[in-house]
Image: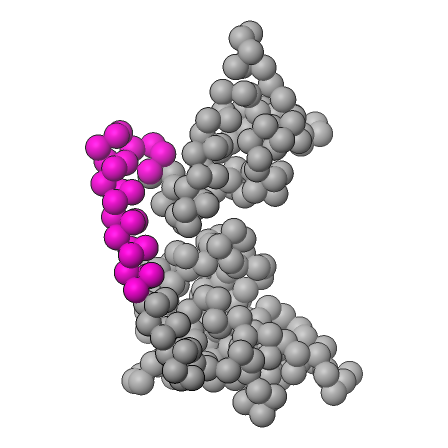
Amino acid sequence: MTERDVRMPIGEFSRITWLSPKALRLYERRGLLLPDVVDGYTGYRYYVRSQAARAREIALLRRAGVPLERIAAMLDADPPERQRLVQAYRAELDRAHERSVAMLDDLARGRAAADAVSDAAVRVRATPPRAFVVQRIRTTAADLPSHIERLAASLTQRAGSAVDGGAPLVVAYHGEVSWESDGPVEVRVPLLDAGVADATEEAGEEAWVAVPYGDVQFPTILRSFEAVRAAAARDGRTPAGPPRELYLHGAPFRCEVAQPFVTA
């Protein structure tokens, strides 16, 4: 066995690649960097030194902001295709930078939204029993919008005439979603018939707030999540169930963020 093939535990591999064990486990889940061996009894993960080059490429692409969903395609492409993929992503970054500059200009002119959602904006309401067809995914924030759109379409097609067109599409967060964290997330399409549902919720209550169109993107929308979470944890309330985004049908575009709760 050569030096490049010597196996090492995840902690040692973490030190030589400057990637945390948490990041390595995330990359394993996403199929980007699999351990050379996983001990079937202890679950310990072992890597070989020759994998360090791929690990460093992943780290470099992540520092450049490339979403995990696109890194595998870049790493596994031949040189001409890799160049095309990188240039396409660079063009997207240029457009995003232009949008960021425009928002900063708005801030300088005093037209940006406040840093926090006011208590007065958060309201409480009763919720009816709900039934859904559901699909759970893992995704980081960069590719979440495209996944929501794709899964909503496929779930709606699967449900057919059972879809409740008057109820909102629900995106429920069972874990943190950020540039580095990948949920999981559930996309839930509402149904008229609970008998064909993948999941149901009983009637209850939730704290909710309407989200302006310009604040729906990550990380701006986190202000709304923080506001409803705080409202669901005071006045004898306890948050119950995952926080969620609600996308309502019709025009104009409307989004709400909600947190179910129970009252002591």
Residue 195 placement (x, y as % from top left): 48, 70
State the residue at coordinates (61%, 39%).
Answer: 20
- Vertical arrangement, residue 104 with respect to residue 158, above or below: below
Residue positioned 27% across, 36% down in the render = 82
Quick one: 100 or 260, which is closer to the camera? 100
Q: Is 91 part of what is drawn in magenta?
A: yes
Q: Is residue 35 above or below residue 229?
A: above
Q: Residue at x 62, y 31 (%)?
A: 15
Residue 149 in the figure: left or right of residue 21: left
**Side of 75 relative to 124 (left or right):** left
Location of the N terminus by quadrant is top right
Regarding residue 210, the answer to whether it shows in the image is: yes
Left or right, 81 with reference to 20: left
Q: Give coordinates of residue 81: x percent, y percent.
A: 23, 35
- Closer-to-camera residue (150/9): 9
Name the image quarter holding the C terminus: bottom right
Coordinates of residue 218 in the picture (x, y in percent): 45, 66
Q: Is residue 253 left or right of 119 when viewed as pictured? A: left
Main SS class of the magenta portion in the image: helix
Quarter location, residue 107: bottom left
User: Where does the magenta region start and end?
Assistant: 74-98
Can residue 165 be found in the magenta stretch?
no
